[in-house]
Image (cartoon, rainbow, N blue to C red):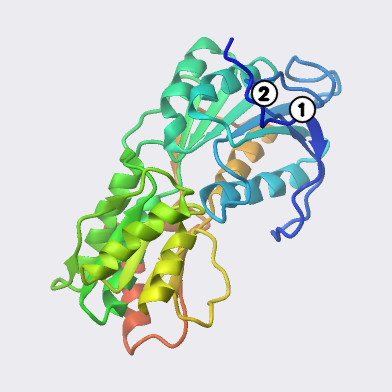
Amino acid sequence: MPHPRPAAAPPSWTNPRPGLRSRHRTGLTCALALAGVTALTGCGGSSAASADDGTLKVGVLFPGSLSDDGFMESAYRGYQRAAKTHDGTLVFGKAEQVATADYEQALVRFATGSDLVISLGGQTDAAVRKVAARFPDVRFAEIGGPADGRPTANLALYDPRQAEAAYLAGAASALLSEKNTVAFVGGAELPAIVNAAQEFENGARAADPGVKVLTPQYVGDFNDAAKAKQSALADYGAGADVLGQVLNLGHKGLAQAAAQTGSSLIGGPIAHPCPADGSYAGYVETDIGAEIEYAADHLAAGTWKAEAVRFGLTSDEPHNDIVLCGEPPAGVEKKLDALKAEIVSGDVTTR
């Protein structure tokens, strides 16, 4: 067994983090803390799934921070909504800020006591596939894995279409750039993030065929604001004046670089009021949590399937969008609406 990590707290019941606003108020949720990895506890009193009272258990692996203002926090908001909606029917447990080396062990702990296990992020893909194969009677869902991944007999794949959001960010960046030069910064060189970088470029060129798109940069950490700032300063120094990104806390470094250089970036996946300093040109919105709700709804209804589901603008309820800050130049919003319509109609397909 790996040596316990000293920073972890013991398992406990937790109230939802204050300050988060969502469509529903949330009830209590059950937290799994990892010290090395500890067992799932406090989730109905039994380590076996499907408690005697008929409730079903859902375990969710959040590799990052629930307050990252990015992918994980967006997903956590959906976790909270699902816990409220299915209070009394489903019991939710979570593990957050899990080290890469502990993904597999955390998923195993969930699988031994859950009816459904959900993992967040493509970085968990290898681990969740391995564990799903070991527990064929447990349902699994991966959110944000490789775009070309295939579901297995008990593993569903939910695609939040980050590439689609990146396409919109690229289009907006090109339309708003005064230097006719834009760039993209990603947290890690994972397949889904590389695809997002390519779609950022595709969107930029669809909006303005003559725009210059710099080579994408990958920070190596979604949450390292200092490294992200260095990458942004390099891009701004190379002539870009609007950046797209797929980062979590790291986007704060981009905002610092933008304010320092008089440039801007496209934020997201959570939109905020636009800051007065103009560092944010807009936000792409991607509701990662809608996929947790989708899985929970189907588990509760008895209709869960190991399927591949694409969300975003082409889903029944669009979960991707873009909002601009300030008063954009004439024609920008009209052009973005036209590009969104092309995605919905299928004339434009993002990977």
- Residue drawn at point x = 55 percent, y = 44 percent: 291
Residue 140: percent from left, percent from top: 55, 26
Left-right relation of 227 to 303? left
Q: Is residue 138 visible?
A: yes
Q: Is residue 350 visible?
A: no
Q: Quadrant of the N terminus?
A: top right
Instruction: Assign a secondary structure to mark 2.
Output: loop
- Residue drawn at point x = 57 percent, y = 69 percent: 272
Left-right relation of 265 to 68? left
N-terminal label among 1 and 2:
1
Compute the Cα span from label 1 to label 2.
8 Å
Above or below — where is 150 with respect to 211?
A: above
Q: Quadrant of residue 97?
A: top right
Compare residues 291 and 110 and report the one nearer the observer: 110
Q: Are marks 1 and 2 in contact (CB under 8 Å)?
A: yes
Residue position for label 1: 10
Residue 236: percent from left, percent from top: 28, 69
Please tell me how crowded label 2 is: few (under 14), some (14-19), or many (20+) other residues with Cα within 10 Å: some
Given the image, on which type of amino acid does mark 2 rest? Ala
The disc at residue 35 is 2
Above or below — where is 172 with respect to 107?
A: below
Left-right relation of 158 to 217? right
Residue 157: percent from left, percent from top: 45, 34
Compare residues 137 and 124 and report the one nearer the observer: 124
**Which residue reaches farthest left?**
210
Above or below — where is 246 with respect to 326?
A: above
